[in-house]
Image (cartoon, rainbow, N blue to C red):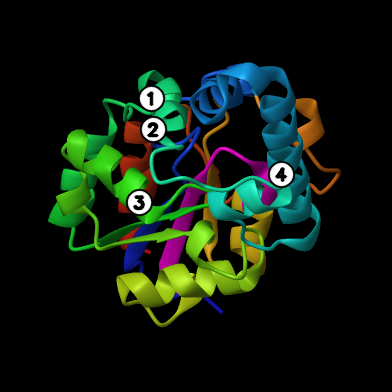
């Protein structure tokens, strides 16, 4: 049976809408620890990093969402109101949206397509939406869905279902998902009934990879290369 007519394109965030940067995450948590207690920076940063790693491992194996509040809870620390400011300040230079995104989103919307984001993240909605607004693309999105607000994370089908519901699409095969990871973004999307486009431009750490393989419905080297793929599917 042929797929439904294309209605929506949903994107991963980190490594897809924002280019992949290889960074030492330990430095981010040292910045947070310095804010919490300058006399115990190494100890607290180690606990926060270990907690974050444990929760990402849980996400990869159990496909469950997690939040920064859980990081602090697992590290047995209190999440003070301003404790995350150094974390987001550290990451700020690595969050800028790919220059292709603004023209791409405009073209997709001009074709009558819904546009959304589904991201595996521990960050709160406010920070992600602030970044997208800063770069002038938030208003071009019909919905943003973050695993930090869900019981599930990619590749769990329920995460994709939440994104489909948020953009207002009922049939999974009328949507396409675009991401840089084979397991979470290609395998997960296809298992949930969506078409999947792989953008293989991220240097994903080995410990974050799995043995699961999948054949994407399309591969694009840059985001604007998605347009001819979408145009072909729109005419099928």
Marks 2 and 1 sit apart, C-alpha to C-alpha, by: 6 Å
Q: Which one is in front, 7 or 204?
A: 204
Depth-wise, is mark 4 or mark 1 nearer the camera? 4
Return the x and y of residue 146 as percentages of the image width and height.
46, 58
Near-viewer residue (236 or 225): 225
Say if mark 2 contacts mark 3, CB within 8 Å: no
Residue 84 visible in the snapshot: yes
Relative to the observer, which residue lies in front, 75 or 181? 75
Rendering coords of residue 50 (x, y %): 76, 36
Q: Position of residue 90 (x, y in %)?
A: 44, 21
Q: Are marks 2 and 1 in contact (CB under 8 Å)?
A: yes
Q: Looking at this rendering, what residue extends furthest in the right direction?
A: 211
- Labelled disc at residue 75: 4
Please name the residue that numbered disc 2 is placed on.
Answer: 85
Residue 180 located within the stretch drawn in magenta? yes
Residue denoted by label 3: 230
CB contact under 8 Å: marks 3 and 1? no
Residue that sits furthest to the front in the current view? 39
Q: Distance between the residues labelled 4 and 3?
A: 44 Å
* Res 234 → quadrant: bottom left
Whole-percent x, y for residue 111 in the image: 18, 57
Q: What element carries label 2?
A: helix
Corner quadrant of residue 66 = bottom right
Q: Is mark 1 on a helix, strand or loop?
A: helix
> Which comes sooner in the sequence, label 4 or label 1?
4
Mark 3 residue element = helix
Q: Which span is picked out in magenta?
A: 174-184
Crowding at label 1, few (<14), some or many (≥20) Cα neighbours within 10 Å?
few
- Residue 132 as seen in the image, left or right of residue 16: left
Q: Residue at x 18, y 55 (%)?
A: 109
Q: Report the residue marked by disc 1.
A: 89
Left or right of 64 in this view: 219: left
């Amino acid at each position: 049976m042929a797929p439904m007519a294309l209605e929506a394109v949903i994107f991963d965030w980190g490594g897809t809408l924002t280019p992949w940067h290889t960074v030492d995450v330990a430095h981010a948590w040292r910045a947070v620890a310095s804010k919490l207690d300058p006399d115990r920076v190494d100890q607290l940063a180690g606990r926060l990093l270990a907690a974050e790693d444990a929760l990402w491992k849980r996400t990869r194996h159990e496909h469950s969402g997690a939040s920064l509040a859980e990081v602090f809870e697992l590290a047995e620390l209190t999440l003070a109101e301003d404790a995350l400011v150094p974390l987001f300040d550290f990451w700020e230079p690595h969050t800028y949206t790919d220059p292709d995104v603004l023209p791409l989103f405009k073209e997709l919307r001009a074709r009558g397509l819904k546009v959304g984001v589904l991201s595996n993240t521990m960050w709160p909605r406010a920070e992600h939406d602030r970044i997208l607004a800063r770069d002038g693309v938030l208003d071009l999105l019909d919905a943003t869905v973050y695993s930090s607000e869900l019981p599930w994370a990619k590749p769990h089908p329920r995460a994709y279902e939440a994104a489909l519901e948020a953009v207002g699409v009922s049939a999974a095969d009328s949507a396409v998902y675009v991401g840089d990871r084979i397991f979470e973004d290609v395998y997960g999307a296809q298992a949930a009934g969506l078409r999947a486009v792989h953008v293989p431009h991220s240097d994903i750490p080995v410990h974050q990879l799995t043995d699961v393989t999948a054949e994407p419905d399309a591969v694009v080297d840059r985001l604007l290369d998605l347009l001819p793929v979408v145009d072909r599917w729109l005419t099928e």
